[in-house]
Amino acid sequence: MTNMLLADWNTTFDLAPFDAISDADFAPAFDTALAQARAEVMAIAENSAPPSFANTIEALEASGKGLDRVLSVFYTLAGADSNPKRQELQREFAPKLAAYSSELYGNKALFARIESLWAARDTLDLTPEEARLLMLTHRGFRRSGAALTGDEEARMRQIMARLAELGTAFTQNLLADEAGWHMELAEADLEGLPDFLVDAARSAGREKGLEQPVITLSRSLIVPFLQFSPRRDLRKKAYESWVSRGAMGGETDNREVAAEILRLRAERAALLGYESFAAYKLETEMAKTPEAVRDLLMAVWEPAKAQAERDAARLTEMMQADGINGELEPWDWRYYAEKRRQAEHDLEEAALKPYLSLEGMIAAAFGCANRLFGLEFRALDVALYHPDCRAWEVTRNGSHVAVFIGDYFARGSKRSGAWCSAMRGQAKRPAVQGPVVINVCNFAKGDPALLSYDDARTLFHEFGHALHQMLSDVNYESISGTSVARDFVELPSQLYEHWLEVPEVLERYATHVTTGEAMPRELLDKLLKAANFDQGFQTVEYVASALVDLAFHEGEAPADIMTKQLEILDNLGMPRAITMRHASPHFAHVFSGDGYSSGYYSYMWSEVMDADAFASFEEAGGAFDVERAKALESHILSRGGSEDAETLYLKFRGRTPGVAALLKGRGLAA
């Protein structure tokens, strides 16, 4: 039988034929595609013709497309719809891919060709984008150890292979802990919970084959449970399980996995001549140095901590008024913060939810994209990897732009969090290809599905990433879309969140799921006035995570990550009733791969820019100012990594922003 992963896809927009692909296809397709990629690289390295941009750099860009296609399908499924076979394949593929990467960057003949082009770059008559691709290719090879030889080169290969294995293990351990825990609720335990949460808990129970409602470790279930359950004992049980993910003991414990990752990263950086892994990692980011990152985080930490401590005192008073003596605990914060929000802003999340349907918020995200960039969305009837997935063709002025796929609901086979990925990136060379972009979220399933305001913000955030992919307009896929500095990649996503707060957007799309009536103006005003509520808490839990990430990678790797984590938080004076947003054993951003290692700060670095960028719309003609939207697309969304991130921002805004707009936006300014 034909292995569709290796065949031509005669499908709508060349989408993967998920209904014709089985798990048994992946291993043989992977081995075939990997061998082909190796052969393509060797052909470039052994080319007898003198090196040129076309026969070396552009040829490298064109290599490995078959392997990319196999892996895009596989890793889409492995992240969003895992099963034991796919997890086994992940463990099998990881060291093989690490070995291939080491072979690629360790190919001395290939590196010699790239070096000769780099040395002669001023004589090659390259376009700015070609010059950028040459620089990135040369830099990538050097930073991957291409100049290493002998024992150092061999050790680097060992390190990269082991890191690939450990990253996969970390992810799978976390998924196992998340899928393996739930708390059944008796009917009496539902007292005080809003209807939307009860419905979601019953749906989660049915998914597990149970008659009782359950709370799982999905954020969309456990956070509202912590907000609304009057049962302090159950809140404590749920909270302690939530923050213990990856540290529950046994085979899925991630503590030693993370410690070994840190040791190997430190050794990797030393082999490459850097004083720390943080110094190595930040060299290519906008921040450039660990010192610049720390300066930003500490500028935000102090006012955020001060606000959190004032809030903690108020919540403690409320708790003691309920007859509970002692200290405010982490499992108390959200419950009393919700009570405080109701008291001070007369705003109940249960009253908001009927106006924040999933369908309405998808329409809102699409509607804003239409007004800003002229994009239109048409539902597609195509085979996808799970019944919950939906697809749309994205067009502009009747021309195809992209395919967008949404996978919105939590399930046991999906890793936690939310993300955007491209199954196929935009490119013009060596062949024209339109992007296929996926947003994956973990919203609680319901009939109909209702979102919290935080969920709605997540939807807009991930769609901002999707726009960065879909509106890309460069020649080469490796610098298209979100292929930018890590501390720049969150700018489009966080910027897009601002449109959710535009009153006319909520007036149009936040309609009651039953009556269809618009959100009452009074409720809308309360929502917007409460936008900065509890920002002390939210900022502290985020910045603490970012500072721990940075400290882990700045010096010698800690022998015990939990001891080191506690030491860092103690030195910061971490408020006792707040914990890190991501404790180290489940800090997937940092330990599932290198993506956000030494880079979790990047959300805040980007927030400095997104606050300033949205202000430019407000200073012009408003949130939907035509000229500002054109500038955003022209200088940022369409350019990918074809220019330096700072250059792109300066072209869009004309200046570099400071931290003041961020503090004001979070309500933390003095």
Image (spheres, grey):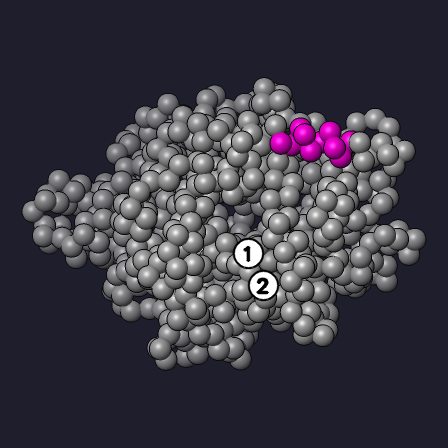
| 3 vs 632, nearest the viewer | 632
- Above or below — where is 39 with respect to 243? below
Q: In the rendered image, which residue does mark 1 sit on?
A: 501
Q: What's the amino acid at mark 2?
A: Leu
Q: Are marks 1 and 2 in contact (CB under 8 Å)?
A: yes
Q: Position of residue 201 (x, y in %)?
A: 78, 58
Q: What's the residue at 46%, 43% (across, down)?
A: 607
Q: Where is residue 40 in the image (x, y as percent from the top left)?
A: 27, 57
Q: Where is residue 572 in the image (x, y as percent from the top left)?
A: 58, 23
Q: What's the amino acid at mark 1?
A: Glu
- Above or below — where is 72 with respect to 598? below
Query: In which quadrant of the rendered image does the C terminus lie?
Result: top right
Relative placement, left or right, of 361 versus 287 is right
> Which mark sits nearer the N-terminus, 1 or 2?
1
Q: Main secondary structure of the magenta part?
A: helix
Q: Is mark 1 on a helix, strand or loop?
A: helix
- Near mark 1 (Cα within 10 A), the count class, few <14, some 14-19 or many ≥20, is some
Distance CA(mark 1)–CA(mark 2): 7 Å
Q: In the rendered image, which residue does mark 2 sit on?
A: 506
Examine the structure image and report whether residue 6 is included in the region drawn in magenta: no
Examine the structure image and report whether residue 311 is included in the region drawn in magenta: yes
Q: What stretch is highlighted in magenta?
A: 307-316
Relative placement, left or right, of 448 versus 18 is right
